[in-house]
Amino acid sequence: MGSLNKCMFIGNVGGDPEMRYMPSGDAMTTISIACTDSWKDKSTGEKKELVEWVRITFFGKLAEIAGQYLKKG
């Protein structure tokens, strides 16, 4: 029996979606999401922040919907 891996990325879209069409005619949309993690350093008491960029690609009908509705921010 197969397994399912699930990821949730919570953040802000870093730029407008890049939508393209493959030679077969299917849509492909790519976005980048900035996921921010912040914490307080125990030794100095200083607030720290780390931003990780995640690149996501959509295909088919979902790519068309993402290209239409997603915007930077």
Image: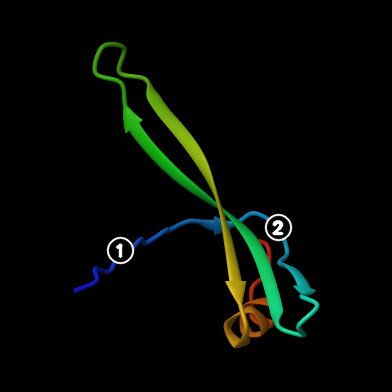
SS at badge 2: loop
Judge whether residue 61 can be spotted in this image.
yes
Q: Which mark is residue 15?
A: 2
Where does the image place residue 67, in percent across and percent down from the top left? 69, 77
Where does the image place residue 41, in percent across and percent down from the top left? 30, 21
Please, is residue 70 above or below residue 5 in the view? Answer: below
Residue nearest the observer in this picture, 12 or 64 = 64
Q: Residue at x 24, y 71 (%)?
A: 2
Q: Which residue is mark 1?
A: 5
User: How far, Cα to Cα, is label 1 from label 2?
Assistant: 26 Å
Q: Residue at x 71, y 67 (%)?
A: 17
Please, is residue 29 above or below residue 12 in the view? Answer: below
Of callouts 1 and 2, the N-terminal one: 1
- Answer with left or right where residue 34 lies relative to residue 71: left
Q: Residue at x 77, y 75 (%)?
A: 22
Please, is residue 71 above or below residue 52 in the view? Answer: below
What kind of residue is marked 2? Gly
For the N terminus, the image quarter is bottom left
For the C terminus, the image quarter is bottom right
